[in-house]
Amino acid sequence: MAIAAAVAGATVVAVGSGPAPEAAAAPVSAFYTPPAQFSAEPGAVIKTAPMTVFAAPPGATGWPIQAQHVMYTTQYQDGSPAAVTGTYIEPPGPWQGPGPRPTIVIGPGTAGQGDQCAMSVAFSTGLTVTADPSVSLSANQEAPAAAVWSALGARVLVTDYIGLGTPGIHTFANRIEGAHAVLDGARAAHRLGNAGPETPVVFWGYSQGGGATAGAAEMQPVYAPELNLKGTWAGGPVADLAAILQRIDGALIGGAIGFAINGLLARYPELHTAIDRVSSPGGRAMLETLSNECVGDIIIRQPFLKTNTLTSDGRPLIEHLDAMPEAARALADMHVGGLTPTSPVLITSGRNDDTVPYGQARRLAEEWCAKGAAVTFRTNDLPPIFPGATIPNHFGPELIDGFGPDNAITYLLDRLADKPVTGCAIN
């Protein structure tokens, strides 16, 4: 498809016309720098570049897989245009599932906040190591999901989210911007694949990605009503950011609290004074350090970080946030569940998840059910293994619920087959 056709007649904006995000490190490659002007139309394709994906199993359709690095237009929280990147995989073979060939948009789990953490950076090889300003590791966590859906013959787009790779800070777990990136990713994929508005769409995400796809599902009826959204998997969703921050303070990935604080500061400038008032010089320096790290980096460099090490009085920063009216407003804006999805949603959560609490995921299902949404909630009863270690207790349910028996793929294939699902089932 000619990119010019996708942007013809659309409003053109200059880079920087959106909110003024905090400074970030230099982009990992020239591709992540938006042109001086680009289309303001949500989902417009700004540019593409070929990408060879080696991090995929050899299959009947050949190896390595050919993909495209894509930059497309989405919106910041305030509605102004933003450039975001991602990876698009054109199906290598015929669609193996029911109905017409669908578009699958994957919202990645937590990758980090540095530009080098963008999922597309590691997509080709599965793992990248960068050395500027310091050694950093980034992995393509979404390779299994992308490989499965691609092997089934779906077109796949994996978004990087706003501020990962592209200019500005990544607004970690921002309900609005994460949802925009997912919804506009579907629009961009349709343009790249010459797919019409009747094309079935499915959203897939776990953890931060589960929060992004949940946000996208409930915003779709208003923000992107033309999308033929058939179903969503919101696995272990970050639905209540405040609850997540409480849970991971002192956990293996406690440094992710810095990702959240940095993202909130970028969109709520009034928070700066309040945070500065309670944080120590070392705490402010740590927030700056975390803004350029990936999730693997915080596990290696700042494991089990406690926010009482960031404050001037030794009280946890989370306690201070509870007393800040500025923080209360920001965290309320990040809450998923205030709107109503009009397409079916599968929510899964581990009862013993030590990173994204089970209770807030179940509350999301209950909130949507009370509004009349078609929600299936499944509890994963995997026993706790080394509580606080994150990896077995948070990612174990992802593997089971995403790819195990009675999995999310089966649920979504049923939605693509138009098998009816009504009302709520909370198990």
Image (cartoon, rainbow, N blue to C red):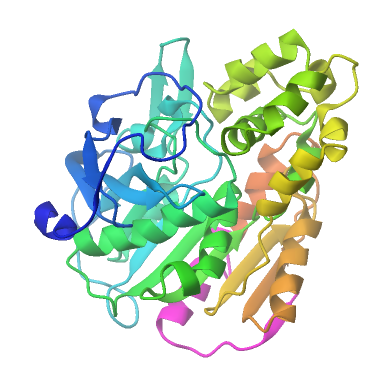
Residue at 53% x, 27% y is: 294
Residue 410 magenta-highlighted: yes
**Which quarter shows the N terminus?**
bottom left
For this view, does 216 lie left or right of residue 426?
left
Q: Please, is residue 254 above or below residue 184 in the view?
A: above
Q: Which residues are magenta?
A: 402-427
Residue 246 found in image quarter: top right
The image position of residue 229, as x and y in percent, is: 43, 74
Q: Quadrant of the C terminus?
A: bottom right
Side of 402 where 304 appears, left or right: right
What x and y, as percent, mark residue 145? 43, 54
Which image quarter: residue 92?
bottom left
- Is residue 92 at least partly visible in the picture? no
x then y, percent, for residue 174: 58, 47
Say whether residue 86 is magenta.
no
Q: Is residue 388 above or below residue 78?
A: above
Residue 151 is situated, as x and y percent measured from the top left of the image, at 30, 60
Image point 75% across, 39% down: which residue? Answer: 326
Q: Is residue 115 above or below residue 344?
A: above
